[in-house]
Amino acid sequence: MSSIAPTPTAPTEIASVIARLAAREARIHLLEEENRWLKAQLFGRSSERATPSEECGAEQGWLFNEAEALARAAATAPQTIAIPAHERAKRGRKPLSPELPRIEVVHDLPEAEKVCPHDGTPLERIGEESAEQLDFRPAQVRVIRNIRPKYACPCCRQGVKIAAVAPTLFPKSLATPALLAHIATAKFVDGLPLHRQEAQFARLGVGLGRATMAGWMIRLGATHVVPLINLLNERMFEHPLIHCDETRLQVLKSDKAPTADHWMWVRASGPPGERIVLFDYDASRGGAVPRRLLEGYRGRLLTDGYEAYAGAAAALGLVHAGCMAHARRRFDEARKTQPDTASHAATALDFIRELYLIERALWDRDRPMQADERVAVRQRRSAPVMARFHAWLEALAPAVLPESRLGKAVRYALGQWPKLEVFLREGEVPLDNNRCENAIRPFVIGRKGWMFSDTVAGATASANLYSLVETAKANQLEPHAYLSLIFTRLPTLTTVEDYEALLPWNVNTELASSAAQPSERQNVVR
């Protein structure tokens, strides 16, 4: 006969069983949550953008769908809605750019058919029908043969004269500025590794090795463009706000193990028309790096919750602002583990969405606001939302499991709250650090292609070249055209003013005028 375990009767034994059951339930809850989150990562939407229905609900302000709120909204809603006149955009294919060269192919009738079939009278041209197609010609590699005639006196056969060699970045090299710009653009804009570019050149009949191209890029990034990078860094320190972020990088040959993490640090600053994006390589992720990068700056710093930035801001006396998008991201992850649309995570997202709806009107490019105007609007509209949001977080914190996704999101938001509130009193500070994250994204995408840097010198050069192309893109410049101009002018520069003339906002008009040349037209009759 099997023995039956005795039923616990002592209060201590009952309390012990209850505690074990509670711990087991909490563990089950966490595992179920993790399972739902992993399924969402594998099969769900990767975008954090709210659905149209969610945005509509937040814009109406019905965060909790309470009957009182609905009744109050219904009572104050207008009975009639005036719809302003508008023009519907024409659907269909967009017209091709008029700046593209045109080849006109005329499909004409044979001469025998240009007569009337009834009386033989010659037909007159009364018009035409035309349709445009987009054609493509593969890249063309050509050789520029530089010829310098020699001159001498026919009498004395002395005093031979010859034109001076045109200054170039790499004397006796076969690379033109346009070729260097193409290689840099392909790698640092399009994410095309040098070994793939080597294969492309081979298909065009050119034997150009990846080692040669790598040497060119290192010399460009580590030496020739450094004065421009220094000027951009000085100009960045003149602006009232700097965004910062960092991402991993693998460097094979360094003092660390080949598999160890290195870091690419990114700073972004400047108003529209004078945007600056700077990349900096460092083997460390420690707090000394942001202190070095921000040494001498006296302004505002906007970052995520990484504590190294907090230490740097405190040491340098900077106003440190937090990123609401990072707080939102944690609640969005928690929402994916809670299928109930009325979950606490969904409520937190509603609070944050309401803040973004207020911010949307404050950064309108067509109607820009001054910093003090933004502060006034935020104090009137955003501050009450933040107060309600904070009170809600404080009340929720003791009721959630600390190790759950929701618990981590609540703890992160409360821990970052002093920095998240900075935007209420600093009109130059936006609600999030998305500008820096958007600037770092091309590097992350390109890293999937070229995967690593071979040496520290290569990582440093890559950082400087990424800085140039991302700054050019931020100022609406075509990267290849901008790099071609830089690489052509650099050998002739001698003064600081010469280098300042090559900053993106100073060459914008020149590049725009060169791109606006009339399109070439060729006539072909068929």
Image (spheres, rainbow, N blue to C red):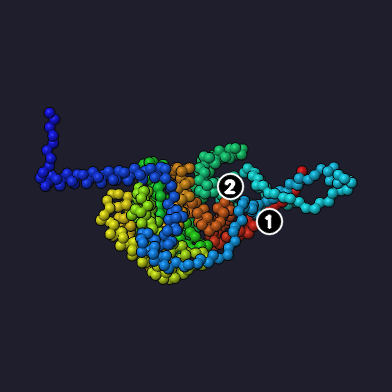
Q: Is residue 343 above or below residue 143?
A: below
> In the image, what residue type sits under mark 1?
Pro
Residue 355 shows up from this direction: no
Q: Nearer the viewer, residue 352 or 90?
A: 90
Q: CA distance from mark 2 to mark 1?
A: 24 Å
Neighbours of disc 2 within 10 Å: few (<14), some (14-19), many (20+): some
Q: Earlier in the sequence, mark 2 or mark 1?
A: 2
For the point 37% across and 59% down, the residue is 65
Relative height, residue 82 to residue 149 (above, below): below
Q: Nearer the viewer, residue 100 or 357?
A: 357
Q: Which residue is mark 2?
A: 179
| Quadrant for the N terminus in the image | top left
In which quadrant will I find the C terminus? top right
Give the residue drawn at x 46%, y 62%: 360
- Percent of width and height locating residue 121: 88, 48
Note whether residue 485 is visible: yes
**What percent of the width, then of the height, locates residue 264?**
42, 50
User: Which of the two discs, 2 and 1, sits closer to the camera?
Assistant: 1
The residue at the point 54 percent across, 46 percent down is 186
Q: As rendered, which of 143 and 166 lies closer to the eye? A: 143
Callout 2: SS? helix
Above/below status of 254 relative to 368: above
> Which amino acid does the dot numbered 2 rest on?
Leu
The residue carrying mark 1 is 518
